């Protein structure tokens, strides 16, 4: 980040790491009669700024980056959480289905057993179907358990990322406030430097577009 005079018309000094983007925006979006004066006044600060201000600016940038990183991590954790929830729901549905099939085949087995002695083949068949359904049920239960664990893990990670994001955001708000405070405290030095580097400037302390006096 580098310091510039008059990036915005109501702020004397601000920082940018892509001033061309702002210049392009001014040329494309600002009223035609404002463009010339905006671009004439927008220029890099040449002299040394108070170390207190530079330090607070660096801290604010760092907190901003940390906040952006924490937000990305939070978004990712939320996506993983949603995905794990879907997988869990699907596994639960498969589990329910396997349980139903298991019960059905059990009924068939009981029926065939009642016919015991009459129909050996039917009993064998029902027995095999029952065992098969039992295996499917055990498998579905294991899969559901696994997806449930994954979901719990994703929930914990999601909550953790949320906490980290809240913390990073609070740190950024604090760093921003500290910078604003340093800016206010350094304003006399900033204004003195501005007077040297920006002669014939219409800046009146609040804007570069002062109302014409009547
Ligand atoms: Zn100026």
Image (tube, rainbow, N blue to C red):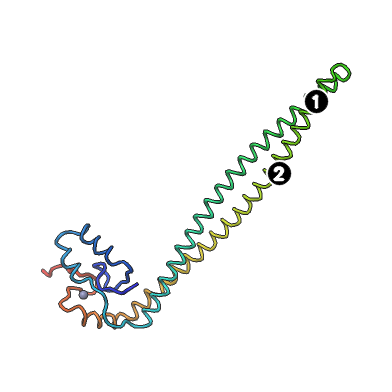
Question: In the orientation shown, which residue stands out farthest toward the top?
Answer: 118
Q: Quadrant of the N terminus?
A: bottom left
Q: Residue at x 18, y 59 (%)?
A: 31
Question: In the orientation shown, which residue stands out farthest toward the left?
Answer: 214
x then y, percent, for residue 68: 44, 62
- Does mark 1's beta carbon lie closer than 8 Å to ligand 1? no
Q: Residue at x 20, y 60 (%)?
A: 27
Question: Is residue 2 left or right of 43 when viewed as pictured?
Answer: right
The image quadrant that residue 197 belongs to is bottom left
Give how far apart the Cα atoms at labels 2 and 1 are: 24 Å
x then y, percent, for residue 132: 75, 32
Observer-nearest of 17 and 175:
17
- Mark 2 or 1, nearer chain start: 1
Q: Residue at x 38, y 76 (%)?
A: 181
Question: Residue beneath label 1, please?
Answer: 109
Observer-nearest of 103 and 9:
103
**Alpha-carbon neighbours of circle 1 within 10 Å: few (<14), some, or many (≥20)?**
many
Proximity of marks 2 and 1: CB atoms separated by less than 8 Å: no
Question: Residue beneath label 2, please?
Answer: 142
Provide the secondary structure element on which disc 1 rests. helix
x then y, percent, for residue 32: 15, 59
Say if 139 sits above or below 186 in the image: above
Provide the secondary structure element on which disc 2 rests. helix
The image quadrant that residue 50 belongs to is bottom left
Say if 98 sits above or below 156 in the image: above
x then y, percent, for residue 176: 40, 70
Q: Residue at x 51, y 66 (%)?
A: 167
């Amino acid at each position: 980040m580098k310091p510039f005079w008059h990036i915005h018309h109501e702020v004397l000094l601000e920082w940018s790491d892509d001033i061309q983007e702002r210049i392009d925006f001014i040329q494309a979006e600002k009223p035609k009669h404002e463009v010339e004066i905006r671009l004439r006044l927008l220029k890099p600060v040449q002299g040394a700024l108070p170390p207190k201000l530079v330090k607070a600016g660096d801290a604010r940038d760092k907190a901003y980056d940390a906040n952006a990183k924490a937000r990305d991590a939070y978004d990712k954790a939320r996506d993983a959480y949603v995905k794990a929830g879907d997988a869990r729901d699907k596994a639960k549905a498969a589990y329910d289905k396997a349980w139903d099939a298991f019960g059905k085949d059990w009924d068939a087995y009981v029926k065939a057993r009642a016919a015991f002695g009459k129909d050996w083949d039917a009993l064998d068949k029902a027995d095999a179907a029952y065992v098969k359904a039992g295996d499917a049920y055990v498998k579905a239960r294991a899969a559901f358990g696994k997806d449930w664990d994954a979901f719990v893990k994703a929930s914990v990670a999601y909550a953790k990322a949320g906490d980290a994001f809240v913390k990073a955001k609070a740190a950024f708000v604090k760093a921003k406030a500290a910078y604003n405070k340093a800016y206010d405290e350094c304003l006399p030095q900033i204004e003195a430097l501005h007077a040297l580097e920006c002669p014939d400037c219409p800046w009146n302390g609040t804007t570069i577009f002062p109302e014409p006096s009547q």
